[in-house]
Image: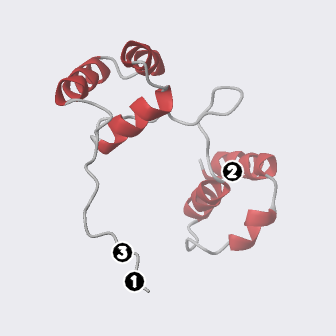
Amino acid sequence: MTANTKTATAARNPNYSDVQVATMIERYTSEPTRATVDAIAHEFNKNSRSIIAKLVREGVYQAAPRVTKTGAPVVRKATIIADINANLGLADNALASLEKTSKVDLEALLLAVQSKVA
């Protein structure tokens, strides 16, 4: 019996040429939007996820900020609780059990605390 080992490495065939990568980076950095990504994907006959992955590897991709359905930025409960603690002059984890409270109630509490402190 012989062991089945691979000693030769397979030659890699890159998905993008250096010229394509340079073009991609130049176009995206001048206008970093999803529409630009889609246009590049159409031009290079690739899917958008492939273009985004390449831009991430090149260190130029900027992810769109997460927003709620109303368009407001996403704020974590832990951040709201930290703000409440700061307004009350408490330690960072003093009100850690508030994590179980709904986000709406936490936001209302933060507003009430801020209005009383001010």
- Circle 3 residue: 5
Q: Residue furthest front?
A: 1
- Circle 2 residue: 110
The residue lying at 18 percent from left, 30 percent from top is 18
- Badge 2 element: helix
Question: Which quadrant would residue 80 be assigned to in this image?
Answer: bottom right
User: What separation in Å lies between label 2 and label 1 (alpha carbons)?
Assistant: 70 Å
Q: Residue furthest bottom?
A: 1
Q: How is the image coloured?
A: secondary structure
Question: Which quadrant would residue 31 be assigned to in this image?
Answer: top left
Q: Nearer the viewer, residue 67 or 53?
A: 53
- Badge 3 element: loop
Give the mark nearer the N terminus: 3 vs 2: 3
Q: Residues within 10 Å of mark 1 (few under 14, many from 20)?
A: few
Q: Amino acid at mark 1?
A: Thr
Q: Residues within 10 Å of mark 2 (few under 14, many from 20)?
A: many
Left or right, 110 with respect to 34, comes to: right
- x, y (%) of residue 100? 80, 64
User: What separation in Å lies between label 3 and label 2 (alpha carbons)?
Assistant: 63 Å
- x, y (%) of residue 42? 44, 14
Give the answer, above or below, for where 52 lies relative to 75: above
- x, y (%) of residue 99? 73, 64
Q: Nearer the viewer, residue 109 or 22?
A: 22
Give the answer, above or below, for where 44 lies relative to 93: above
Left or right, 19 with respect to 60, comes to: left
Give the answer, above or below, for where 29 lies relative to 60: above
Mark 1 or 3, closer to the camera: 1
Q: Amino acid at mark 3?
A: Thr
- x, y (%) of residue 68? 67, 33
- Circle 1 residue: 2
Q: Amino acid at mark 2?
A: Leu
